[in-house]
């Protein structure tokens, strides 16, 4: 009977692929690079898909098989086993926690934007609300989720899957409406010509490259689910290949769709904030549906964002009370309430988000706040992704210490290491280049203000992780002296 129940818990490989796909890339992700690069981003997508995303996906597949079983916990456990160091495992876990915080704020701020489109039906939020009020409302959303985490998370667990499916449905509707527009005399805003595709290389181009990495990161999230597949040796590689092809198809088709709707040389300044709503509004009005299509997307987006916030808060706060954290963090942060929830970890998460939100609230406009958050995410998230390739390099340098792998990306050791180093260095360099602000003219006061904000925030997020083990060491020493 137990064996029968165990069999019922198997996950289909298509289900796994779609689950990770929803996590890896969202509908609005191609909008950001389109604003920065115009139609040239189509060439960049193809290059990145072939020479970065494809090896990234296959590297994640090899890591998933290499660390299957007890060590399937993700990058933190991969580093711990690969290096034999609990401290490096903790540092990796902390990096994962740190990169979650800006994304959590981004989701909460997007909730406010989504609600504004549902209520107002236009882009007037920036004129009706100051950045500081916007940032405080953003924090209040996070605070509410932190306070009611038990209730909210349980209520939203089921909606996470359905909202993801609904978002995929909205993406399909977007493509269908683009085709409908073209077959009913629709005008192509940016035609596929050399003048529109050719690059205009500048420092800004290179500092924005991490947007592409940020948009495509997350294939390693499938690794812990290897053991959930009935025939992992056959099904896991198929799931990862499907993930790659669906991601590639989505970003290429959506970029072409954006070229139909928006003139790449005259992109609205608030495109990162409102671009996806503009798209559905344009398509809906062209089809004689008014704002109904945009309203449907806004509701689906809102539910999806709420589910993401619940999951992010739970994952972030639970890391602070994980087994690795017990050894390197002060006991005060590990305290749990009567419901066995890490209460002080939640307070710490709230305090960290509040600091970042108040800092962003000092920017001149809400649009600047949204753009700055994206800039921070394109720094910290690729730094986290670079650790995936570090795990792969450790694995291949110490291959003799591991059992024979069921899946090997490149059997030739030198070839595998060369690809691993290429992916690691590209990711790390792009993340570092992203410190250069992507908004404001180079050398202006606004540009330098955002540069210092980027440096301070990243040092704060990652640096705190190094301070806490020192506090833990002082705490242990104090207790020993006291006894």
Image: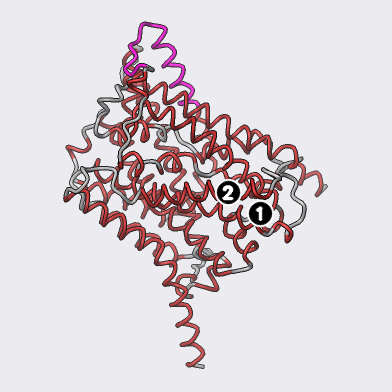
- Residue occupied by mark 1: 396
Q: Nearer the viewer, residue 121 or 194?
A: 194
Could you classify mark 2 by the number of other residues whose Cα lies within 10 Å: few (under 14), some (14-19), or many (20 or more)? many
- What number is the disc on residue 63? none
Task: Please say if 315 is above or below 286.
Answer: below
Question: 71 left or right of 293?
Answer: right
Report whether residue 118 is seen.
no
Q: First in sequence: mark 1 or mark 2? A: 1
Q: Nearer the viewer, residue 106 or 143?
A: 106
State the CA–CA distance, disc 1 to disc 2.
9 Å
Question: Magenta stretch: residue 174 in it?
Answer: yes
Residue 370, image x, y percentages: 29, 43
What residue is at 61 percent from the left and 50 percent from the top?
A: 417
What residue is at 49 percent from the left and 50 percent from the top?
A: 425
1 and 2 marks in contact (CB < 8 Å): yes
Name the secondary structure under disc 1: helix
Task: Please say if 379 is above or below 352.
Answer: above
Residue 212, image x, y percentages: 43, 39
Magenta segment boundaries in residue numbering: 169-191
- Residue occupied by mark 2: 420
Q: Which corner quadrant of the image does residue 89 belong to?
A: bottom right
Question: Magenta stretch: residue 356 in it?
Answer: no
Residue 312, image x, y percentages: 46, 51
């Amino acid at each position: 009977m137990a064996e029968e129940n165990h069999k019922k818990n198997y996950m289909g490989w298509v289900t796994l692929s779609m689950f990770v796909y929803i996590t890896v890339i969202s509908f609005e992700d191609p909008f950001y690079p389109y604003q920065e690069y115009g139609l040239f981003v189509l060439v960049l997508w193809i290059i990145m898909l072939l020479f970065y995303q494809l090896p990234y996906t296959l590297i994640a597949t090899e890591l998933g098989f290499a660390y299957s079983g007890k060590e399937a916990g993700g990058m933190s456990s991969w580093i711990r086993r690969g290096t034999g160091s609990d401290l490096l495992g903790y540092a990796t876990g902390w990096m994962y926690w740190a990169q979650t915080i800006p994304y959590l704020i981004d989701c909460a701020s997007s909730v406010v934007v989504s609600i504004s489109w549902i209520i107002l039906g236009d882009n007037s939020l920036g004129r009706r609300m100051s950045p500081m009020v916007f940032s405080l409302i953003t924090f209040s959303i996070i605070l509410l989720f932190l306070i009611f985490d038990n209730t909210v998370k349980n209520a939203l667990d089921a909606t996470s899957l359905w909202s993801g499916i609904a978002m995929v449905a909205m993406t399909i509707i977007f493509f269908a409406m683009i085709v409908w527009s073209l077959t009913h005399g629709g005008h192509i805003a940016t035609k596929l010509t050399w003048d529109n595709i050719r690059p205009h290389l500048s420092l800004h181009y290179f500092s924005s490259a991490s947007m592409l990495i940020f948009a495509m990161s997350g294939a390693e999230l499938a690794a812990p689910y290897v053991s959930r597949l009935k025939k992992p040796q056959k099904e896991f590689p198929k799931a990862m290949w499907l993930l790659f092809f669906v991601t590639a198809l989505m970003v290429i088709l959506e970029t072409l769709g954006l070229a139909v709707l928006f003139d790449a040389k005259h992109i609205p300044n608030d495109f990162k904030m409102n671009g996806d709503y503009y798209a559905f509004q344009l398509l809906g009005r062209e089809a004689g549906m008014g704002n109904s299509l945009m309203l449907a997307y806004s509701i689906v987006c809102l539910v999806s964002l709420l589910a993401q916030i619940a999951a992010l808060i739970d994952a972030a706060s639970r890391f602070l009370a994980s087994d690795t954290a017990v050894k390197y963090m002060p006991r005060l942060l590990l305290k749990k309430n009567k419901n066995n929830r890490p209460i002080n970890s939640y307070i710490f998460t709230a305090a960290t988000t509040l600091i970042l939100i108040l800092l962003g609230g000092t920017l001149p406009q809400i649009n600047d706040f949204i753009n700055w958050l994206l800039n921070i995410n394109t720094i910290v998230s690729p730094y986290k992704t670079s650790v995936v390739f570090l795990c792969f390099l450790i694995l291949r340098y110490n291959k003799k210490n591991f059992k024979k792998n069921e899946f090997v990306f490149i059997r030739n050791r030198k070839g595998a290491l060369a690809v691993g180093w290429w992916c690691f260095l590209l990711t790390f360099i792009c993340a570092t280049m992203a410190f250069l602000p992507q908004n404001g003219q180079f050398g202006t006061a606004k540009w330098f203000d955002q540069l210092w904000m980027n440096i301070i925030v990243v040092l704060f997020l990652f640096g705190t992780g190094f301070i806490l083990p020192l506090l833990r060491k002082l705490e242990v020493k104090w207790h020993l002296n006291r006894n």
